[in-house]
Amino acid sequence: MSGRADEVDMSFGIERSAERARHVGAPVAAAADLGAFVAGPRVALRPTGSGPLDGLTFAVKDLIDVAGTVTGGGNPDWAATQAPAARSAPVVEQLLLAGARLRGKSLTDEFGFSLEGANAHYGTPLNIRAPGRLPGGSSSGSAAAVAGAVVDFALGTDTGGSVRVPAAFCGLFAIRPTHGRSLIGPCGADGALLAAAARIAKEHHAADS
């Protein structure tokens, strides 16, 4: 099965998302969006293989390439000048190969330059663990989507806390990227799942070095 970009079937995984949302005390009605994703048709990539991530879903911060989509970096003027990515980032390809399904590109603070999670152009994702409070940034959409049980885990980037801060704000686990070992920091609600996703990303990075 080859990965391709298309509009996601919004019924996919909603039952499981709703069950997880109830478990964390989140409103089920919010499980479908949370303002966590890039505006427009939700992009999706089907798994390209089978492995330890079979049946799981993830989101990708809008600083990471996904084949057939523009990497907008949280800024509409920048996005308007960019061509769609010819291929997905290697870490995305590796997760798809391990059986995970991509369910969308998540919002980021503009150019990743904030720890608050508020984007003047696209809005602020809902922190479902603390409604009315900021979700943290800059991987705000990734953390919001996981906390609200829309996806099982998500990818972000972290130079000065951009994965760790939103994870803390939204009550999640996160792994800080390490130079020379892992370039992308995932976040998730389950520590074991997060560790599995991080191992896959790390193994790819080691093989690609």
Image (cartoon, rainbow, N blue to C red):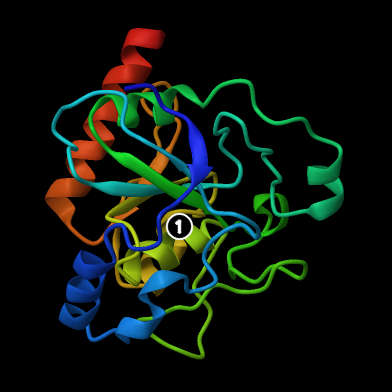
Give the number of callouts: 1
Q: In x, y percent, where is residue 188?
A: 28, 56
Depth check: 115 or 82 in front?
Answer: 82
Image coords of residue 43 (percent x, y): 52, 46
Is 44 situated above or below 28?
above
| Residue drawn at the location 42% of the way across and 31% of the way down | 92
Q: Quadrant of residue 14?
A: bottom left
State the residue at coordinates (42%, 21%).
180
Label 1, residues with CA under 10 Å away: few <14, some 14-19, many ≥20: many
**The residue under label 1 is which amino acid type?**
Ser
Q: Is residue 57 above or below residue 149?
A: above
Q: Residue at x 31, y 32 (%)?
A: 47
Residue highlighted by disc 1:
142
From the image, which quarter does the C terminus lie in?
A: top left
Question: Quick check: can you spot residue 61?
Answer: yes
Relative image position of residue 199 (x, y in whole percent): 22, 30
